[in-house]
Image (tube, helix red, strand yellow):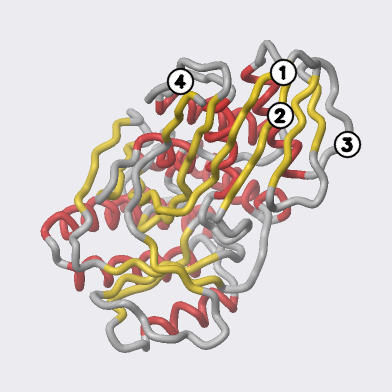
Amino acid sequence: MNATGDARRAFAPGRVNLIGDHTDYNGGLALPMAVQLGVEVEYRPEDQPVLLVESDLEAEPAAIPLTGPAGQLAPWAALAAAVVALVGPARGGRVRVRSDLPAGAGLSSSAAFSVSLALALGVPADPVGVARLCQRAELAIGVPVGLMDPLAAMASRAGTALLIDFTSLRTEPVPVPEGAVVTVVDSGVRRRLDATAYAERRAQCEAAAAALGRALGACSVAEAESLADPVLRRRARHVTTEDERVRAFARVLADGDLAAAGRLMSESHRSLSRDFEVSTPELDRLVERLEATPGVLGARLTGAGFGGCVVALSRHPLGSLGTTRAWTVRPGPGARVEAL
């Protein structure tokens, strides 16, 4: 990566999580895949005390002071202000944001934005360091996210998915077979994590882990089943069985066994819907519709749930899905930055 000039352009991809949701903050496993869509940020420094941030997705620019309170900002600008506060750039200037990622669709547009902004502002391109900074920025605006999205944006390689162990933060590329077709299908249900029960699910997982004496990612399915509280038992059962599915998925994907991979994706959705209760009627119906579509091997909600998108695995591109928005995504590379 070349970041020697004062002006920089950075790009960070969105991601689709093939399997392993709500495992990251539990010290478990996940297998996301960076996609070819993403967010590009161009930063041109000037001797002024603010960053003027313009986005092709917003009508009005946002003026973010380098020091002091930023005042009332739109959610996307509040995230930018949180990144700026953590990075502490010495100079203001102009920031231009371009994106072809659909916002609120479960493709991690907020992480792609915060990663690309941090890199453009000069943060060293260390995957774990950038991921932690972007996580802190989201926490600062009240969104209790894990590390999966920014780490996937930073550490992914073209042609592969990324197996992440959230206890050690070790990552391992897993080849995606050339015959695999990954389609992201929009449910049409928009959501923001801070307006959902995401924080409640995290708290329930923390309570289950406290009852078991260790992080859920380190527990067995049998330990999860031993919990007396039925809600905590279901939450822990999802995490522990999902970790088993991630391990199995990584093996069968590397072996090219797409049929087995599809079955694991469908099992994952049932667990997210029934045990973790983060699906919606619209997502459930969309998964059922896709599973009934000829050529589809499996489907599941992707991301935190409560809306957004479903990911489907097939051997051939899907035909028309009517008025439903869909994207065929390719495994893309991780973030990059260049001097201008």
The residue positioned farthest toward the right in the image shown: 71
Mark toward the start of the polypeptide (1 vs 2):
1
- Residue type marked 2: Arg
- CA distance for labels 2 and 3: 20 Å
Q: Which residue is mark 2?
A: 94
Q: Are marks 1 and 2 in contact (CB under 8 Å)?
A: yes
Under tag 1, what secondary structure?
Answer: strand
* Element under disc 4: loop
Vertical order, 76 against 188 (above or below): above
* Image vertical order of residue 302 relative to residue 76, above or below: below
Q: Nearer the viewer, mark 3 or mark 1?
A: 1
Residue 145 as seen in the image, left or right of residue 24: right
The residue identified by callout 1 is 46
Residue sitting farthest toward the top: 90
The residue that mark 4 highlights is 3
Q: Residue 280 at x, y = what percent? A: 59, 72
Which amino acid, by three-letter code, is at mark 3? Answer: Gln
Comparing 248 with 93, the one in front is 93
303 up-or-down from 89: above or below: below
- Specify the quadrant of the image occupied by residue 90: top right
The residue indicated by pointer 3 is 72
**Is the N terminus in the top left, top right, bottom left or bottom right quadrant?**
top left
Image coordinates of residue 230 in percent, x first then y, are: 52, 59
Whole-Å distance between the Cαs marked 3 and 1? 24 Å
Cα separation between marks 1 and 4: 17 Å
Residue 177 placement (x, y as % from top left):
18, 60
Quarter of the rendering containing residue 94 = top right
**Residue at the image point whose x is 39% and y is 68% from the top:** 328
